[in-house]
Amino acid sequence: MLRSVVRTVRYARGWKNGSAVSLHEIKIERGGTSLPATFTSPTSYRGALPGWIVLGGITRMGRFHPQLVRFAHALAASGAGVIVPEVPEWRDLRPAPRVTVPTVRAAVHALDARPDVRAGKFGLIGFSFGGPQAAIAANHEELSERIACVVSFGGYCDIERTLRCQLTGLYEWQGVTRRIAPDPYGRWVLASNYLTEIPGYEDAADVAAALRRLAWTASEQRVPAWDPRLDVLKGELRAGLAPRRQALFDLFAPLAASPVTRREESERMAIDLAGACRRSEPLLDPAPELRRMRVPIYLFHGRGDRLVPYTESLRFKQGLSDGLAANVTVTGLFAHSADDRPPSVPARLREGLIFFRALQRMLGSVG
């Protein structure tokens, strides 16, 4: 109990003020391919460290995403050895869920080889797309015996519901439908990869390529996907398409100030694109895997998340077996990959205490 409190205090201090940590650029071996990874540890410690593996999401910044780096440093400052492997496919904006297991396996082997990391089980953390993929990977027979817990930040549960929200702004929980202004980044990434797998859209490769360019630019330049600064690029990409394909491009990438007007068409597209994703890569949809999960899971989600609604983490927990240790924390302290801030001091204190306790349980579960 006391040890987990100390770790959480160190994490919180490192997150807020920055962390004095040691960084090591290393190589891991994934299926015969050497991949880069970053290993982070506290500058001073006694004894072997508990080990954590951290997976990012689908972004051009890869393991150097500022929020991912900040998190890894704070986690190391808590008194842990943290490895963040690069996933080239995800950095190339290709979901490729099949690479998750070999990537995690390679990270486990790398931690096993380090004398400064305690032998045994490790924690596995995934952000955004990496969250459900980490949970699915922990189901793998070889890995389930090596993973102490899985942690998901901002992950999704049902790909069709998630796409529906990304295309229409609507999401539902317990019979109540709510509306947000959706972040279009996720729908750009998925459509760029799987639009041509939808029957009737096999020849829409030009639209898929335009959406890929849009997602690539937003990610590489760190411009929010909803930002009006991308409207000029949208206009250029749209003008380069055949006139009969421009309306399809508009469905995914309207100008920033445009309201959602083609709701029925967007609903159908969410269903069709989710189906194409499942057919192409069944592991893109974690929902069918939930009942098989055997490793304790901690789910964190920002209440104001515009890319993946927080109800996806609630739904994730709901789909797990009753006997599995699982905890979900919805917070106003962050959105998808950025800090958020409750408006009042009492709200910030309340949210901070809830988040602190959840982190304490998480950090206490390894080593």
Image (tube, grey):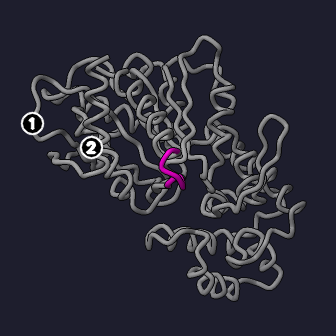
Residue 187 position within the rendered picture, expressed as x and y whole percent measured from the top left: 66, 60
Residue 124 position within the rendered picture, expressed as x and y whole percent measured from the top left: 40, 32
The answer to whether 306 appears left or right of 252 in the picture is left
Quadrant assignment, res 283: top right
Q: Residue at x 73, y 53 (%)?
A: 165
* 241 w.r.t. 130: above or below: below
Q: Amino acid at mark 1?
A: Ser
Q: Examine the structure image and report whether residue 343 is included in the region drawn in magenta.
A: yes
Quote the CA–CA distance across marks 2 and 1. Answer: 16 Å
* 57 w.r.t. 219: above or below: above
Q: Residue furthest top?
A: 323
- Count of marks overlaid on the render: 2
Q: Nearer the viewer, residue 75 or 105?
A: 75
Quadrant assignment, res 364: top left
Quadrant including the C terminus:
top left
Q: Nearer the viewer, residue 367 or 253?
A: 367
Where does label 2 land, which residue?
A: 13
The answer to whether 192 appears left or right of 26 in the picture is right
* 3 w.r.t. 16: above or below: above
**Res. 12 mark:** none
Report helix, strand or loop for mark 2.
Answer: helix
Q: Residue at x 34, y 40 (%)?
A: 30
Residue 60 position within the rendered picture, expressed as x and y whole percent measured from the top left: 43, 63
Report helix, strand or loop for mark 1.
Answer: loop
Quadrant including the N terminus:
top left
Where does label 1 land, which residue?
A: 44
Q: Nearer the viewer, mark 2 or mark 1?
A: 2
Q: Examine the structure image and report whether residue 51 is included in the region drawn in magenta.
A: no
Instruction: Provide the residue span drawn in magenta.
Output: 341-346
Residue 325 position within the rendered picture, expressed as x and y whole percent measured from the top left: 53, 17
